[in-house]
Amino acid sequence: MASRKESTSVSSTAMASTGGTLDSPVKQIQIEGLVVLKIIKHYQEEGQGSEVVQGVLLGLVVDDRLEITNCFPFPQHTEDDADFDEVQYQMEMMRSLRHVNIDHLHVGWYQSTYYGSFVSRALLDSQFSYQHAIEESVVLIYDPIKTAQGSLSLKAYRLTPKLMEICKEKDFTPEGLKKANIGFEQMFEEVPIVIKNSHLISVLMWELEDKSTVADKHELLNLSSSNHLEKSLQLLMDRVDDMSQDIVKYNTYSRNLSKQQQQKHQYLQRRQQENAQRQSRGEPPLPEEDISKLFKPPQPPPRMDTLLIAGQINNYCQNVKEFTSQNLGKLFMAEALQGHN
């Protein structure tokens, strides 16, 4: 999937000029209902379990509102399809849409997620390339597992101005992140989504809801959902283990750095004492040496991965919180119904 993300970034760079300001130009996203159905259908046809599906979002910008009016998927292909050119495919698709007078402006991309596991370095790099080339770009995250439980899970994210600056400078050292004063809370900003449908589609949805059976509505009180909670907690524990390993790496780096500083200080003291003795004997002092060559500082571990892990842990915690709060509500409702009967 990494090669696909890189090719989409190159394509977006070729199609738009670089944004000049860092202030978020998008305050709201208006997405057509047909686009939502296309994203859902794309995952149902090509997504399998944890397999991620991706696609391109098309639309236009009106004031501070981003209107997403169309989309098309990236085709699934194997390593045998070496001749397939993703960039050429996107250009031909948008050229064909332009010929039939359909919105063809590139405004972002979408991706499915598996139990909310989308905060990764690959997504960060791809969204930075999009947002650096197309200022209004967003990424839509579709969660099919949450959607299958009865509520549409579709969220839009953008990189914050602080994170855009860090990614431009590519300074992911502990000192660079500390200077920027950025934590996992300031990495992504969520943009509110409004789904727009035509009046005919709204009438059709009203009729479908009116025809739904009472049994289907009672399924909302179903309490047999422990598998989802168990999987979410398992993924959460895996990321906590990753965080623990990163903490061990950083502590090891800190100890090595402190140890080297002590060795450097001892070396300088010995040099001063020896020079003082040579001076008392009337001998010339020792020649100056480059301390940085004698004591090369240890390489600091990259801290951006740690921030991403912390962001993913926070996302898992929010999912578990939402899930458990819904189940608690179901328990109280079921208890009330049982007491009433």
Image: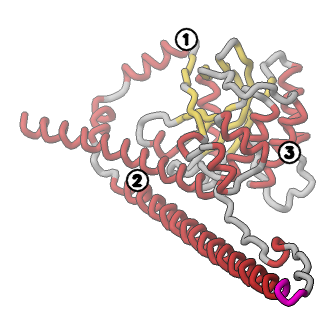
| Disc with the residue nearer the chain's start (1 vs 3) | 3
Residue at the spot of label 2:
228
> Magenta segment, principal secondary structure?
helix
Q: Position of residue 168 (x, y in %)?
A: 78, 42
Task: Answer above or below: position of 106 versus 147.
Answer: above
Quarter of the figure with the C terminus = top left
134 or 38: which is nearer to us? Answer: 134
Locate residue 168 relative to residue 199 in the image: left or right: right
Q: Position of residue 233 (x, y in %)?
A: 41, 58
Q: Is residue 8 rendered magenta in the image?
A: no
Specify the segment rendered in magenta: 278-282
- Pointer 1 local density, CA inside 10 Å: few below 14, some 14–19, many at least 20: few
Label placed on residue 200: 1
- Name the image quarter holding residue 8: top right
| Label 3 element class | helix
For the rendered model, the colour scheme is secondary structure
Quarter of the figure with the N terminus = bottom right
Q: Name the residue at 69% across, 50% down.
A: 176
Q: Position of residue 67 (x, y in %)?
A: 67, 19
Q: Name the residue at 78% across, 40% down.
A: 129
| Disc with the residue nearer the chain's start (2 vs 3) | 3
Label placed on residue 161: none
Q: Name the residue at 25% across, 43% down.
A: 328
Residue at the spot of label 3:
86
